[in-house]
């Protein structure tokens, strides 16, 4: 036979099955607040990934142009004098670049500044990447 104490505990357990309406509403509020924040975070991460890719490609274009100037200097003895602009196709994007040479305090050494952007109008004020290097004449 079951004791009365066991029967009363058994009936008490049966009364507490499931969630109350308040618990469900609180859970839904938490999800409603967290989900938009998570979507915003994912969206920002996606934008940052695109910008990082664009900057990396622009830096590669700048390094390619610098190597072109160095090779040209080794082959012909001529080096960039003043300002030169151009464009190149790289990774399916047309990149625009501008290179400027500056004299330095060290004799026979010049500084070359290269700016790169996917939009020609952004070269001056908002380049995607910039590179500075020093070359002996």
Image: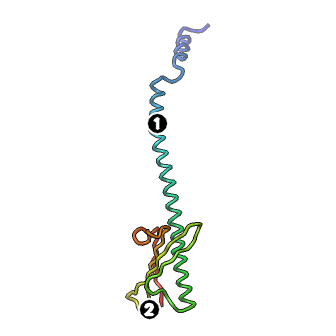
User: Label 1: which residue?
Assistant: 32
The residue closer to the viewer here, 121 or 68, is 121
User: Sequence-wise, which precedes: disc 1 or disc 2?
Assistant: 1
Please tell me which residue lies in front, 36 or 25. 36
Q: Quadrant of the N terminus?
A: top right
Please say which color scheme the image uses. rainbow
Q: Is residue 24 above or below residue 122?
A: above
Q: Secondary structure at mark 2?
A: loop
Task: Give the residue drawn at x 42%, y 67%.
Answer: 126
Q: Position of residue 34 (x, y in %)?
A: 46, 40
Which residue is at 51% across, 74% downward? Answer: 62
x then y, percent, for residue 135: 48, 85
| Mark 2 neighbour class, 10 Å CA radius: few under 14, some 14 to 19, many 20 or more | few
Q: Nearer the viewer, residue 29 or 123?
A: 123
Residue 119 lies, with reference to residue 70, above or below; the image says above
> Label 1's element?
helix
Residue at which label 2 appears = 108
């Amino acid at each position: 036979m079951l004791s009365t104490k066991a029967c009363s505990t058994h009936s008490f357990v049966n009364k507490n099955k499931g969630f109350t309406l308040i618990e469900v509403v609180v859970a839904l509020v938490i999800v409603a607040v967290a989900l938009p924040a998570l979507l915003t975070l994912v969206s920002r991460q996606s934008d940052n990934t695109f910008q990082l890719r664009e900057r990396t490609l622009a830096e590669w274009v700048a390094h390619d142009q610098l190597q072109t100037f160095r090779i040209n200097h080794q082959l012909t003895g001529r080096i960039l004098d003043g300002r030169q602009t151009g464009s190149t196709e790289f990774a399916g994007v047309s990149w625009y670049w501008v290179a400027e040479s500056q004299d330095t305090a060290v004799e026979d050494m010049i500084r070359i500044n290269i700016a790169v952007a996917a939009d020609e109008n952004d070269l001056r004020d908002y380049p995607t990447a910039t590179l500075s290097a020093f070359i002996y004449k």
